[in-house]
Image: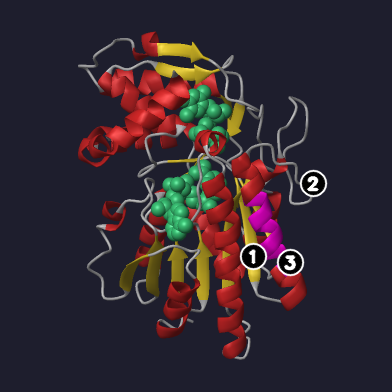
Amino acid sequence: MSRRLLVTGGAGFIGANFVHHWCQAYPDDRVVVLDALTYAGNRRNLAAVEERDNFRFVQGDICDRSIIDQILKTESIDTVAHFAAESHVDRSILGPGAFVQTNVVGTFTLLEAFRQHWQVNSQPADYRFLHVSTDEVYGSLGPKDPPFSETTPYAPNSPYSASKAGSDHLVRAYYHTYRLPTVITNCSNNYGPYQFPEKLIPLMCINTLIGKPLPVYGDGKNVRDWLYVGDHCRALDRVIHFGTQGETYNIGGNNEVENITLVQMLCQIIDELVPDLPVRPASDLITFVKDRLGHDRRYAINANKMKTQLGWTSEVTIEQGLRLTVEWYLTHRDWWQPLLSEEYQTYYRQVYQ
Ligand code: NAD
Ligand code: TYD
């Protein structure tokens, strides 16, 4: 069956990678992106697909019911891939309101619109609402705890993860109450092309290239389970096509790394690839800074369900993925330089000074 997708947040990091993946894998499918183009959204992320007949971009807010109703109807959407969110923990500490609005109210608005659309069309069994969420809803692990599974209780610690948890609960409730054909994915930290400069890996790459300090929070021993974004997109593809309605799937790279080790790995790759760095070795720029408030110590995902039920495993190792990512930032200065705007500098000063 060819699908007609609405991708919310498709001009952001993972959404744009997903759109590229989907357009390449299923060129006959219709893809409509709805994105508000917040500071994190960038139309240029979609330049490679803009000219396709089967692609359409709509600028709009997922809290705006009328625009969603209009797209669902006029485009005969059968599949929603919901990425749109406020996604950065540090910004959620500075200003939680936008997180509740977009992540909770926006997801609710989208669910209501999709429920009506599904009901008007006699509840087709092949409709899907994919809700893309995070492992951060499960809270923080101790050093010896087993990784998060799909049955780990929710214990979000930041305004970001709390708002994502709220949206997950709504999606779950729409399946249990209305049998809306939903699936939820909870994924670990992603990295790769098109990630906005404020997140750890792009921030470290870019700061190294421009000779700015590399700010490592606290003792640098917080652990994240890193997944290359292309692996995430392949996983979401499996979930849309073969996932069971009402189920949750955890997606992770089986790649637990302490932040300080990760930054050192990045520095080594950059030293090797860039002969004319402002500061060499790049690791001389590493600076320990005040810890993030409520900083979760460790995240790790048990992705066995994805493997046994949907035949998915991650393919890109952390060494390969970091190298690909550094190479991308090296060859796409014209992409990231304009993003280091006045707004970004103001944000940067608020977090790091
Ligand atoms: P991002 O911040 O790069 O992109 C978010 C996109 O959503 C942007 O294009 C932005 O313009 C858009 N958006 C924000 N508010 C909107 C609104 N009200 N209406 C319409 N569009 C709006 O985020 P990302 O890293 O690509 O994350 C995408 C999704 O994946 C999020 O739901 C996030 O919670 C989840 N996720 C991210 C990671 C990660 O490591 N980045 C890991 C697991 C899950
Ligand atoms: P981040 O990319 O913000 O993802 P998340 O907080 O959602 O896991 O950060 C990844 C890790 O890197 C997290 O433990 C916080 C840490 N970090 C730093 O040490 N310095 C930084 O400047 C940033 C942005 C993050």
SS category of the residue bearing label 2: loop
Q: Position of residue 48 (x, y in %)?
A: 25, 58
Q: Position of residue 138 (x, y in %)?
A: 71, 42
In this rendering, the label closer to the viewer, 3 or 2: 3
Find out whether the residues at labels 3 and 2 contact each other: C-beta distance under 8 Å: no
In primary-sequence order, the first of circles 3 and 2 is: 2
SS category of the residue bearing label 3: helix
Residue under label 1: 183
Q: Amino acid at mark 1?
A: Val
Secondary structure mostly seen in the magenta stretch: helix
Left or right, 218 with reference to 335: right
Residue under label 3: 173
Residue nearer the viewer, 227 or 333: 333
Which contiguous range is marked in magenta? 164-173
Q: How is the image coloured?
A: secondary structure
**Residue 153 marker:** 2
Q: Amino acid at mark 3?
A: Ala
Residue 202: name its quadrant. top left
Q: Position of residue 338 (x, y in %)?
A: 23, 38
Q: Residue at x 39, y 42 (%)?
A: 195
In primary-sequence order, the first of circles 1 and 2 is: 2
In primary-sequence order, the first of circles 1 and 3 is: 3
Look at the image and say whether residue 171 sits in the magenta stretch.
Answer: yes
Q: Cα distance, mark 1 to mark 3?
A: 11 Å
